[in-house]
């Protein structure tokens, strides 16, 4: 009995590290409502929604819900100006967002302009004050060296997380990239793995690689797999 309770506790701890994403242009109110209710049912950390869906997610979850709401900013390309990103982040928080998932200016990383990269992160983080900011660097578009530098410099900003991918470009998160980000970022910033995480095996692999949070559009399937004992 004690062993079962301990296993249940471990599963719940994993579930609470999941951000259940509900993004894309085909999201209906019914889909959004189900994602929110599933998040409460399984105890996910947050739901990740587009800015336009933040108010609806807040309504579906209610004021007393323990599930957080994450809103995307400059998603999925990241090529908006700093002023636009700041405005989007502020509006998201005013609409009810508890966290921000901001896509970094990937072209700035590609050209080695880490001064700009750090500036935009800090400007957005300052604008939303104590609201956690997760910075997506789109690892599928970067070299291993660029990933390490992006993680290292993100750790020098006011960001709370550095995140792998949007899920809209390339192959998505890889264990090797998560390990590289974890190593380069040290203990100064958390790491979120997102993109192509479809089942509990993928989820556990990313956590073992060093991810602190998991982003996925397949959160229900991951939860069911864990609860059924498919990933021990």
Image: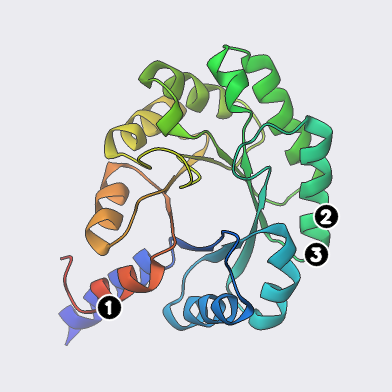
Q: Is residue 116 left or right of residue 20?
A: right
To which residue does mark 3 refer? Answer: 95
Q: Earlier in the sequence, mark 1 or mark 2?
A: 1
Mark 2: give few (<14), some (14-19) or many (20+) Cα within 10 Å: some
Q: Which of pointers 1 and 2 indicates the residue nearer the eye?
A: 2
Q: Residue furthest front?
A: 26
The part of the image, by quadrant, that contains residue 14 is: bottom left
The answer to the question of whether label 3 and label 2 lie on touching residues, with beta carbons closer than 8 A, is: yes
Where disc 3 sits, the SS reads helix
Q: Give the label on residue 8, or none.
A: 1
Frontmost residue, 111 versus 168: 168
Horizontal side, residue 112 vs residue 148: left or right: right
Residue 201 position, x and y percent, is 22, 58
- The reply to whether callout 3 and callout 1 are in contact (CB within 8 Å) is no
For the point 46% across and 40% down, the residue is: 169
Residue 62 in view, yes or no: no
Q: Residue at x 57, y 28 (%)?
A: 154
The residue nearer to you, when weighing 12 against 218, is 218
For the residues marked 3 and 2, what is the alpha-carbon distance in whole angstroms? 6 Å
Q: Could one spot residue 201 in this view of the protein?
A: yes
Q: Is disc 3 surrounded by few (<14), some (14 to 19) or many (20+) residues within 10 Å?
A: some
Q: Which of label 3 and label 1 is nearer to you?
A: 3
In the visual, does 147 lie left or right of 50? left
Report which quarter residue 179 is drawn in.
Answer: top left
Q: Residue drawn at (67%, 35%), measured in percent from left and top?
A: 158
Q: Quadrant of the C terminus?
A: bottom left
Question: How far is mark 1 from mark 2, CA to CA?
Answer: 38 Å
Instruction: Please tell me the numbered disc located at residue 91.
Output: 2
Picture coordinates of residue 117, whole percent (x, y): 65, 23
Residue ID at (39%, 34%):
182
């Amino acid at each position: 009995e004690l062993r079962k309770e301990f296993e249940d506790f471990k599963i719940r701890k994993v579930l609470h590290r999941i951000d259940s994403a509900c993004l894309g242009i085909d999201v209906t109110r019914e889909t959004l409502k189900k994602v929110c209710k599933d998040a409460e049912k399984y105890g996910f950390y947050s739901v990740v929604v587009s800015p336009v869906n933040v108010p609806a997610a807040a309504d579906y979850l209610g004021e007393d819900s323990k599930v957080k709401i994450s809103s995307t900013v400059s998603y999925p390309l990241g090529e908006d100006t700093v002023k636009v990103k700041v405005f989007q982040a502020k509006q998201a928080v005013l609409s009810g967002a508890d966290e921000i998932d901001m896509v970094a200016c990937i072209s700035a990383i590609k050209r080695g302009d880490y001064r700009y990269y750090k500036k935009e992160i800090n400007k957005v983080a300052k604008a939303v004050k104590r609201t956690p900011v997760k910075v997506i660097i789109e690892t599928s578009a970067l070299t291993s060296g660029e990933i390490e530098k992006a993680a290292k410099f993100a750790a020098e900003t006011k960001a709370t997380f550095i995140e792998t991918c949007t899920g809209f470009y390339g192959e998505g998160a890889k264990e090797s990239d998560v390990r590289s980000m974890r190593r380069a970022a040290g203990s100064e910033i958390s790491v979120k793995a997102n993109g192509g995480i479809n089942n509990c095996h993928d989820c556990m692999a990313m956590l073992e690689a060093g991810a602190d949070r998991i982003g996925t559009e397949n959160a229900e399937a991951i939860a069911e797999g864990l609860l059924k004992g498919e990933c021990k």
